[in-house]
Image (cartoon, helix red, strand yellow):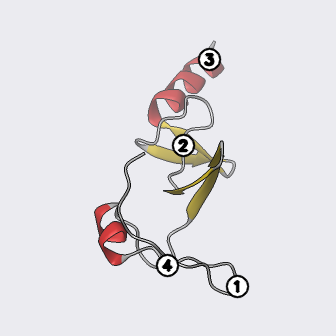
Amino acid sequence: MKSTGVIRRVDELGRVVIPIELRTQFGISEKDPMEIYVEGSSIILKKYEPNCIFCGSSKKLTEFEGKPVCKKCATNIFKISEE
């Protein structure tokens, strides 16, 4: 992990402000959903990006019954259903 040199305090509600420079760098806007991961003793924040439920791709997604599916997997499912 690379240190940014930025230190922030946790407020009384458990919030930490992410500096504007980092939000800009990572394309994080107000109200964007964030994923929280734990790795060892580290807490990792990542901008949420929906992924295909079958292959994990985040490109060219569509929804099928409320679930994200990429175009390639949707095509494969369609081919299977024709057999």
Q: Amino acid at mark 4?
A: Val
- Sequence-wise, the earlier of marks 2 and 1 is 1
The quarter in which the C terminus is drawn is: top right
Find disc 3 in the rendering and name its residue: 80
Measure the C-alpha gap from mark 3 to mark 1.
50 Å
Total labels drawn: 4
Quadrant of the image occupied by residue 45: bottom right
Residue at 55% x, 28% y: name it.
Answer: 55
User: For the residue labelled by badge 4, is the local secondary structure a helix, a strand or a loop?
Assistant: loop
Find disc 1 in the rendering and name its residue: 13
Mark 4 surroundings within 10 Å by alpha-carbon count, few (fewer than 14), some (14 through 19), many (20 or more): few
Q: Amino acid at mark 2?
A: Asn
Q: Is residue 26 above or below residue 42?
A: below
User: For the residue labelled by badge 3, is the local secondary structure a helix, a strand or a loop?
Assistant: helix
Kindly report which numbered mark, 3 or 2, lies closer to the viewer in this rendering.
2
- Sequence-wise, the earlier of marks 3 and 2 is 2
Measure the C-alpha gap from mark 3 to mark 2.
21 Å
Q: Amino acid at mark 3?
A: Ile
Find disc 2 in the rendering and name its residue: 51
Measure the C-alpha gap from mark 3 to mark 4.
48 Å
Kindly report which numbered mark, 3 or 4, lies closer to the viewer in this rendering.
4
- Sequence-wise, the earlier of marks 3 and 4 is 4
